[in-house]
Every structure is written in structure tokens, then in C-alpha cells.
Image (cartoon, rainbow, N blue to C red):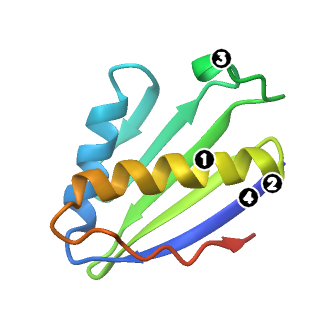
Amino acid sequence: MSSAIASVPTSHASKYLQQLCKHWQHNLVVEFTADHGTVTFPKDARGAEWTSDALVTFDAGADALSARIDASSAEHVEAMKDVVARHLDRFAFREAPLTFDWQAV
């Protein structure tokens, strides 16, 4: 298992968390409140062949959105970083591109 976390500066963290979770709940297993959300990406999503599912966890703060990725390998984490960043930038288009300071956990 590999993990990475980023703190994304924004004053709209709760709004973006909820938009992302609502967007993904149509196809994925999602649980969320205004301040916390989890999204499970299946290991075989979109033809992928990872060894296990990826879990993305979001936590909204007053001035940042925290995003944590737990995935099957370092390569899986890298792929998920791109998925999270692209989708978040789409919803935060007025602020995009947002700054992601990904750190290995």
C-alpha cells in the first residue's frame, strides 16, 4: 500500500469536497458530509488492473482542502493524483489551477 497527502489552499474547501463527492457518487462508492468525504475507486475502473482499490479521503478546513490517497502501489498513487487534481481543478475553475503539495505518507 502506498499513500500521499496534499493540502490544497482554497477558501471553498467544503463546496469542492461536496461537488467532487456528488460527481463521483453516480459511479463509485462515496460517503460524505460537508467536512469529510471518502471515495473508493475500484481496482479495475476504466480498464485498469491495479491489485486493490484506491481510497481518496477529503477533509475540508477553513482555508484548505486536504486530500489523501491510499492505493495499491506508488504508480497507482501517481495515477490517482492526476485524477483528483484534474477533477478538483474542473470544479474550482475560477481558482484553477490549484496548488497540490503532494507528500508521501
Kindly identify which numbered label has been placed on residue 3: 4
Kind of residue indicated by mark 3: Gly
**Disc nearer the start of the sequence (3/4):** 4
Q: Which numbered disc covers residue 42?
A: none
Q: Helix, strand, or loop for circle 4?
A: strand
Residue at position x 47%, y 26% in the image = 29
Identified by mark 1, the residue type is: Met
Disc 4 marks which amino acid? Answer: Ser
Q: Secondary structure at mark 3?
A: helix
- Label 1: few (<14), some or many (≥20) within 10 Å? many
**Quarter that holds the C terminus:** bottom right
Q: Residue at x 37, y 48 (%)?
A: 87
Closer to viewer: mark 4 or mark 1: 1
Q: Is residue 80 left or right of residue 99?
A: right
Residue 17 is left or right of residue 82, and the answer is left
x 41%, y 63%: residue: 59
The mark lying in front, picked from 1 and 2, is 1
Rounded to the nearest angstrom, the CA distance separating label 1 from label 3 is 14 Å
Q: What is the x, y in percent for residue 31?
A: 40, 36
| Residue 88 in view | yes
Chain-order first, disc 1 or disc 2:
2
Q: Which mark is residue 80?
A: 1
- Pair 2/3: label in front: 3
